Image (cartoon, rainbow, N blue to C red):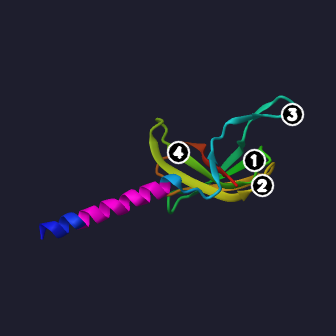
Amino acid sequence: MKKSVKKGCGIVMAVVALIIIIGIFATDGSRNDSNDSIITKSGEEKQKVEILQTTHDFEKYSESYTLHVRVKNNTDKLISYLQLNATFFDKDGKIVGTGIGNTVNFSGDAEKTVDVIGMDIQKAADYEVQIEQVMYE
């Protein structure tokens, strides 16, 4: 009985190691990029993805917020995936919840509205939206 347990553990360890190796070396052609700034032709510095405006709706019954975040892709590259995260704060500045929103196929030099949804957010007095992940084609 002990030999079969050891053999089973060895097989499991080998499978886990193989999954890790595949994960390290596998690429799908896309690349993750930060939202570093770029310099425009006029010499102006801008973020690669810029938050232009944020408005919100509150649903009292479910205590959920939908933030409508207008963003601009300041590059000439197609963004295959963009993720925005929101943090909600009470009147004392304590975190009372988070939200997430995303979009795909965001053309270069284009604007788009991304909805960021926060569920069961109680006593929120303020929120902050951040660009979390940008993946280019």
Quote the CA–CA distance across marks 2 and 1.
7 Å
The residue identified by callout 1 is 73
- Which disc is residue 107 wearing? 2
- Tell me if residue 63 is in the magenta stretch: no
Q: Residue at x 36, y 63 (%)?
A: 15
- Which type of secondary structure does the marked residue at label 4 adopt? strand
- Indicate which disc, 4 or 2, sits on the residue closer to the N terminus: 4
- Indicate which disc, 1 or 3, sits on the residue closer to the N terminus: 3
Q: Are marks 3 and 4 in contact (CB under 8 Å)?
A: no
**Observer able to see residue 128:** yes
Residue 120 in picture, x, y percent from top left: 47, 57
Quote the CA–CA distance across marks 2 and 3.
19 Å
Viewer-nearest residue: 107 or 70: 107
* Residue found at the far left of this picture: 1
Q: Is residue 92 above or below residue 86?
A: above
- Which disc is residue 119 wearing? none
Q: Is residue 131 left or right of residue 48?
A: left
**Observer able to see residue 120:** no
Q: Are marks 2 and 1 in contact (CB under 8 Å)?
A: yes
Residue 85 in picture, x, y percent from top left: 56, 48
Magenta residues span 8-23
Quote the CA–CA distance across marks 3 and 4.
34 Å
The crowding category of the residue bearing disc 4, from other C-alpha atoms within 10 Å (few below 14, some 14 to 19, many at least 20), is some
The residue identified by callout 4 is 87
The crowding category of the residue bearing disc 3, from other C-alpha atoms within 10 Å (few below 14, some 14 to 19, many at least 20), is few
Q: Are marks 1 and 3 in contact (CB under 8 Å)?
A: no
Quote the CA–CA distance across marks 1 and 4.
22 Å
